[in-house]
Image (cartoon, grey):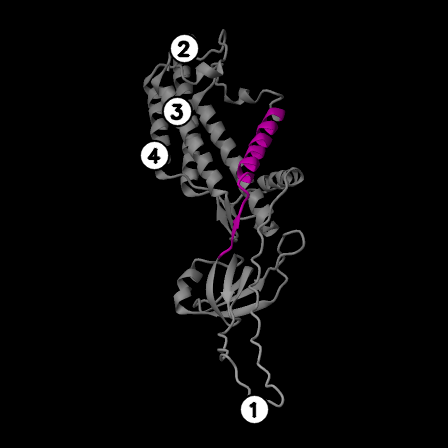
Amino acid sequence: MRPTSILKVISVVVLLLLNASLAIGHDQTTPSPHKGEQAKKKAATVGSPDASKAPSTDSQTPKNPTPTSRLTNARIDAIDSNFASITITDCPPQKGGHSVCNGSVTTLSVGEDLRPELKALQKLDHVTIDTDGKTVSSVGVRQISVPPYLPSLVLGITAAFFFLMTTLLTWGHPLRLIIGQDGRYSNSKFQMAIWFWIVLSTYLAFVYLRVSQAGWEFFDSVDIPKNLLLLSGLSALTFGGAKGITTAKTNAAIAAGDPNPKSPSGVHENFWTDLVQNDAGVFDIGDFQMLMVTLLAVGMYVALTLNYLETIAATASASLRDVDTTILASFGLGQGAYLTKKAVGNAGTS
């Protein structure tokens, strides 16, 4: 799923703000090996008995093999359909650390042993290549090490940016977005809001690090992986399901002549208790379980993401860090238990 145009505009604004506040470190190029000195020849002494003899040497200099050079940053322009050759453009580093693909364009042949690795690459990927000028001896995606402090700093700034935007749009009351129709903080709204916040913050942090470390050509083509998309969908589904169940039971109670069980009159929201108590103000295992599973899943995903952002792969397309099936299954069980509790309970107490 590619980002929408609105999200791209927001991304550009955040990238510019981050560039103004952070000092970005860049990967250094590998220095070329130092050439060896040539062996000196012994000169014959004029007038000596051995002057008429051919000059001798201490050792014979062996023929050098075909020299191999390393391109630390080359862009793939084309890959042969049979994976027998590859066309690349050298992207040498410029003053200031950034690389520009304005070097020589070369077509190199690829041996049988390297073709499986070539199949995993695609056009516009940036790679590191060892070559003798005609054939490829090794090839791999260019990996850029990120300074250890930077992922946490960038993710914190993007999360703060979204929270600030939410605060401005809600006139200083961002938590009002997660209050239900009964005037209490809603568990289903909370878990949907926190996942939306984390996914957007992670997306912008990943885009920024790709651009700052690899270049503006890596601004686009960041996808959301399958499990993360499913988890976000489960979050939205739980919110919709809980809303539907509550509304149906409330309408049924009103139609039967009973007072509105979800009336907010006389209710005072409390963030620290509403998320673990039911509508009657009693601690509820279903609400507690859902809150704990949500916080665990968020914490695990943030930790995995920070580790994932320590290295940026210079590929034409990339995706956010996915969640494993254990987190996905645990999250699904928590959501299912919460909806079941809502379905079988009364509108004013569950």
Instruction: Specify the quadrant of the image occupied by residue 104.
Output: bottom right
86, 228: nearer the viewer: 86
Q: Which mark is residue 85?
A: none
Q: Find disc 4 in the rendering and name its residue.
A: 329
Instruction: State if disc 3 and disc 2 touch (CB < 8 Å).
Output: no
Q: CA distance from mark 3 to mark 4?
A: 14 Å
Q: In this image, 36 relative to 229: left or right?
A: right
Q: Find disc 3 in the rendering and name its residue.
A: 292
Question: Along the polypeptide, which appears first: circle 2 or circle 1?
Answer: 1
Instruction: State if disc 4 and disc 3 touch (CB < 8 Å).
Output: no
Mark 3 or 4: the one toward you: 3
Residue type at tag 4: Ala
Q: Main secondary structure of the magenta part?
A: helix
Vertical side of 100 occupied by 309: above or below: above
Q: Find disc 2 in the rendering and name its residue.
A: 281
143, 279: nearer the viewer: 143
Residue 130 position within the rendered picture, expressed as x and y whole percent measured from the top left: 50, 64
The C terminus appears in which quarter of the rendering? top left
Instruction: Specify the quadrant of the image occupied by residue 295.
Output: top left
Label 4 neighbourhood size at 10 Å, few (<14), some (14-19), many (20+)?
few
Q: Find disc 1 in the rendering and name its residue.
A: 49
Residue type at tag 1: Pro
Vertical side of 243 occupied by 77: above or below: below
Label 1 neighbourhood size at 10 Å, few (<14), some (14-19), many (20+)?
few
Residue range corresponding to the magenta coloring: 141-168
Instruction: Specify the quadrant of the image occupied by residue 348.
Output: top left
In the image, is residue 260 part of the stretch drawn in magenta?
no
Residue type at tag 3: Met
Question: Along the polypeptide, which appears first: circle 4 or circle 2?
Answer: 2
Q: CA distance from mark 2 to mark 1?
A: 114 Å
